[in-house]
Each structure stands twice: as structure tokens, then as C-alpha cells.
């Protein structure tokens, strides 16, 4: 009787343990993995990942099993870098023995990624011959050989596009995270794998990348998915622009705009074309081109979730703009002349103020000629009445919310410069109020070489007893030493 009771207790204990082990969900197992990762020890992490691997293998859950294996491989390579070679062969063997066609192609893509990572750390023509073993023949491969093997894996992975296009990418969660824009591709696995392969486009051969783009565009066109076709076609355009010789940037930009125009002429009404319109301002330096296409985007895709981008670009291209250039030294009695660069400004209020007291000296409202387009700039020269008294002033230019202030000094001095045949410049000061030259007889400006190979003029006097009045500073008089007096006479 005691033996029977003891056996029953042991059996119940074993069944309870089995039920508790079976009741563990993937979320609980991955929580254990995260806890082990916090400890920083590889051993406990490997044990937790082994539990996920076994559970996924029994349940034939390919995504969970692959996720556990890839994380195991990453930790093993961190501890033993040479373990990448047996890991490659393990993935390759799994791909050869896998029976599910879609899973087989996912494994081929994973193997291609491993080859490409190794190609980035291996010279193209010279192989590393360290302590190699006979069971690691791929350790003798060069970087170019790894790259070719990776492209072969990618070809095998994407060979049956029709199969992958009819597989829902959500079936491969958590390995695949389905985003909101996945609806343009109808949530298929083909677009996920193709975009994953194209992440290596800067490292792959250009002909291979263009061929892959063309095959994807042709397939989605024939399948009737215009959204997917336009998105891959735009990615192809951007790839060609990145490969263009930027030494002739204008030509590369013209080619980009020509290809974009041809694409939008065919797919402008497709819902996914809104994404193309959204990306265009980032690669356009032509305001007329950008302004026109942003208007088309608002007209065709006003319900797009990020349509505010189009409105923001239009606002930045057409909002009022004002810059003013005014000399910082002017002569009393002469008109104030300033250069104005503006956009979308029809009237400009100008006011001259005394900088010290803030008192208004004069004011006027000027009408400006509008530019030819809302995004275009215009230039003009304004002439305002001069100031009669010397002093420090500031000119205020305002239009609605925009205000520019330019300080300037007004005095009686006027400077005339004359170029000499030996590349020098002779400057003279003239008293505008007295209509007579200043006591300073003259000044010469001689060219002085600069560090960048150019020349910079340096003002130097010729037998000048005193310096002229500086136009930007208060006038100061330099007096000669006084004659000796009785106290300091010898």
C-alpha cells in the first residue's frame, strides 16, 4: 500500500512538472532569456535559448526556432569568432533538409546575410590563412568569394516570387515586424525579403542590384500591384542617383528629376505615390520643381496620413522673406541707398531712428514689385531721404511680422578711392559740408598676400601727420607731444 501511494505521488509530481513545463509560453521563455542577458553570462543565456529551440521544434514553429538559433549564433560568435564557419554550415544544412518551401527560402536569405557580413571583414583577393582546420574549407574563401556565394543564396531565396507573394508576412512574427506601410505590398513575404536583401545594395554589384529591382518591378506590374511597383521603382531611382558621379552634380540632378517625372506620369494617382511625393523635397534643389509637385501631391493625396509634409514644404517655399544690405557709413545730406532681397512682400515700411534716443527721424512706406512666382525671390534698390545731422542711426525695415534693423553712422566725411597702375589704391577724405579736402593729404592701399594665395589690401599712409576720422568710431584727435616747458627743460 505504501509503495502504491509513493508511486502515485511520484507520478503526480512528474505530471505536474510536465504540465508546468508545457504551460510555459514563448513570452515567458523569452522573459527568461532577457533575465539571463541582464546577468551577462553566456551559459545561462544558452540554456534558455535551448529551451525555446526545443519547444519550437516540437511545435514546428519555424519563426521562434529561427529566432532562438540566430541569437545563439550571435552569442557564440561573440565568444568564439571562428564559430561562424560551423554556424554557416548548420544554417546551410537546415536549408537543404527543410521541407517547407517558404521556410527554405528564408534560410537561404539568412545564409546570404552571414556570407555578406563575412565578406565585409575579408579582403577581396587575399585569403586569411591562420590556424585553419580541414573541416573549415569556407575559411579559405576571399571576400569576393563570400560575396558571390551571398548573391547565389539571395537568388535562390527570391527565385519563386509568386510563392513568396502569396505568403503572409505575419506568419513569420516575431522575426518579421509588419509595419503600417506594409499594406502597399499586401503584407506579402516577398517584399520583406527583397527589401532585406537590398540593404546590401552598396556592397553588391551594380548590375545585380539593378536586375533585382527590374525583376521586382516587372513582377508587381504583372500582378496588378501598382503600389508595390511604384515604391520599388522609386527606390531604384534613388539608387541610381546615389551612384551618379557627383562631380557633375547638375547633370545628376537633371537625371533624377527626369526619372521622377516619368515615374509620376505613370503612377501619380496610385496611393503609394504619396510616399514618393513625401521624399522628393529631400533630393530637390529646384524650388519651382518642388513647389509644383507639392501642389500636385495635395491635389491628388490630400487624405494621406502625412499630408502636412506637403503643406509645410509649400509654406517654407512661399512664406515672406526679407534681407536688407545698407552701408554702415553714410554722408550727411546724401540719400540713403539700400539693397533689398525679398519674397512675397508687396509693401515695406521703412523708418530711420536715432540709435541713442530712439526718436524717429523719418519714415516711409514703399511698394515693392511682386516676383514672378510665389517661391521666387526679387531684388530692388531703395533710395530714401538722407540724414542732415551726424550721429549714430539705425534703419528699420518691417513687413507684418518680419523686421530688420541696420545700424549706420552718418558723418561729414566722404572717401574717394582711385586705382593706381601698380595695383595700389589711393584714397582721399573729403569734407562734404565744407566742400573741401580733409587735412590728411592722402592714403595708399597696397596689396598684401594672404594665406589662401589671394591678396588683401592694407591701408598705409604716405607722409601723413595724422590719421583720418574713422567712419565707424567716434572721431579722436591725435596731438603731437607738447614743447618742453621750464619745469622739464634741461
Image (spheres, grey):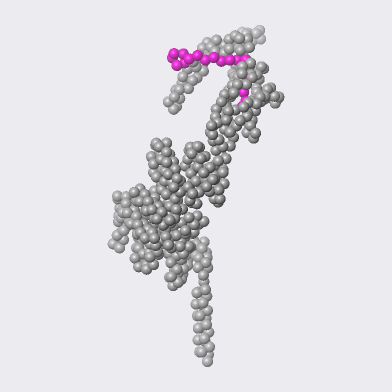
Q: Is residue 274 magenta?
A: no
Q: In the rendering, at what x and y percent does residue 442 appear?
A: 53, 12
The prevailing secondary structure element of the residues shown in magenta is strand
Residue at the spot 49% in from the left edge and 59% down from the top edge: 178
Q: Compared with residue 330, is residue 275 higher up or lower down, i.e. above or below?
A: below
Q: In the rendering, at what x and y percent does residue 278 appear?
A: 51, 46
Q: Compared with residue 341, is residue 442 higher up or lower down, i.e. above or below?
A: above
Residue 285 shown left or right of residue 332 in the figure: left
Q: Quadrant of residue 398?
A: top right
Q: Is residue 414 magenta?
A: yes
Residue at the spot 67% in from the left edge and 24% down from the top edge: 363
Instruction: Work out which residue is located at the far left of the displayed protein and give it.
Output: 134
Q: Which of these two is toward me, 484 or 90?
A: 90
Residue at the spot 58% in from the left edge and 10% down from the top edge: 437
Q: Which of these two is toward me, 127 or 424?
A: 424
Residue 132 shown left or right of residue 369 in the figure: left
Residue at the spot 52% in from the left edge and 81% down from the top edge: 13
Q: Which of these two is toward me, 483 or 179?
A: 179
- Asked if residue 197 can be seen in this view, the reply is no
Residue 354 shown left or right of residue 111 in the figure: right
If the image is split into quadrants, where does the C terminus sit? Answer: top right
Residue 205 shown left or right of residue 408 in the figure: left
Q: Report the magenta residues as a range.
A: 405-424
Amino acid at each position: 500500500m505504501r509503495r502504491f501511494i509513493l508511486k502515485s505521488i511520484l507520478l503526480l509530481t512528474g505530471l505536474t512538472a510536465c504540465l508546468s513545463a508545457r504551460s510555459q509560453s514563448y513570452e515567458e521563455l523569452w522573459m527568461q532569456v532577457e533575465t539571463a542577458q541582464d546577468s551577462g553570462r553566456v551559459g545561462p543565456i544558452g540554456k534558455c535559448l535551448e529551451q525555446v529551440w526545443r519547444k519550437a521544434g516540437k511545435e514546428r514553429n519555424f519563426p521562434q526556432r529561427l529566432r532562438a538559433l540566430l541569437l545563439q549564433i550571435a552569442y557564440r560568435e561573440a565568444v568564439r569568432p571562428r564559430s561562424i564557419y560551423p554556424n554557416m554550415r548548420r544554417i546551410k544544412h537546415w536549408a537543404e533538409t527543410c521541407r517547407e518551401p517558404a521556410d527554405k527560402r528564408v534560410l537561404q536569405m539568412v545564409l546570404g546575410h552571414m556570407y555578406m557580413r563575412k565578406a565585409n571583414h575579408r579582403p577581396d583577393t587575399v585569403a586569411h590563412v591562420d590556424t585553419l582546420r580541414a573541416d573549415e574549407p569556407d575559411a579559405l574563401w576571399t571576400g569576393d568569394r563570400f560575396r558571390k556565394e551571398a548573391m547565389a543564396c539571395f537568388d535562390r531565396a527570391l527565385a519563386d516570387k509568386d510563392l513568396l507573394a502569396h505568403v503572409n508576412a505575419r506568419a513569420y512574427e516575431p522575426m518579421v515586424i509588419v509595419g503600417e506601410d506594409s499594406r502597399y505590398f499586401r503584407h506579402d513575404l516577398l517584399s520583406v525579403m527583397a527589401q532585406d536583401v537590398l540593404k546590401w545594395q552598396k556592397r553588391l554589384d551594380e548590375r545585380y542590384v539593378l536586375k533585382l529591382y527590374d525583376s521586382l518591378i516587372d513582377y508587381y506590374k504583372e500582378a496588378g500591384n501598382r503600389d508595390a511597383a511604384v515604391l520599388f521603382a522609386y527606390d531604384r531611382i534613388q539608387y541610381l542617383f546615389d551612384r551618379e558621379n557627383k562631380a557633375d552634380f547638375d547633370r545628376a540632378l537633371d537625371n533624377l528629376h527626369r526619372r521622377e517625372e516619368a515615374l509620376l506620369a505613370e503612377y501619380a494617382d496610385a496611393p503609394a505615390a504619396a510616399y514618393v511625393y513625401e521624399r522628393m523635397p529631400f533630393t530637390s534643389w529646384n524650388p519651382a520643381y518642388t513647389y509644383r509637385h507639392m501642389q500636385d501631391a495635395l491635389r491628388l493625396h490630400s487624405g494621406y496620413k502625412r499630408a502636412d509634409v506637403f503643406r509645410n514644404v509649400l509654406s517654407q517655399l512661399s512664406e515672406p522673406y526679407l534681407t536688407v544690405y545698407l552701408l554702415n557709413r553714410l554722408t550727411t545730406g546724401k540719400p540713403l541707398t539700400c539693397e533689398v532681397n525679398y519674397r512675397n512682400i508687396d509693401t515695406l515700411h521703412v523708418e530711420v531712428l536715432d540709435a541713442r534716443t530712439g526718436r524717429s527721424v523719418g519714415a516711409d512706406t514703399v511698394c515693392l514689385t511682386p516676383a514672378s512666382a510665389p517661391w521666387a525671390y526679387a531684388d530692388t534698390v531703395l533710395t530714401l531721404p538722407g540724414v542732415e545731422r551726424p550721429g549714430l542711426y539705425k534703419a528699420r525695415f518691417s513687413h507684418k511680422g518680419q523686421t530688420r534693423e541696420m545700424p549706420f553712422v552718418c558723418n561729414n566725411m566722404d572717401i574717394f578711392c582711385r586705382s593706381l597702375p601698380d595695383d595700389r589704391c589711393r584714397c582721399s577724405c573729403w569734407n562734404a559740408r565744407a566742400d573741401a579736402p580733409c587735412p590728411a593729404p592722402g592714403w595708399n592701399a597696397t596689396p598684401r598676400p594672404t594665406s589662401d594665395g589671394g591678396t588683401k589690401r592694407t591701408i598705409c599712409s604716405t607722409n601723413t601727420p595724422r590719421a583720418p576720422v574713422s567712419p565707424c568710431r567716434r572721431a579722436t584727435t591725435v596731438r603731437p607731444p607738447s614743447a618742453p616747458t621750464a619745469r622739464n627743460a634741461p
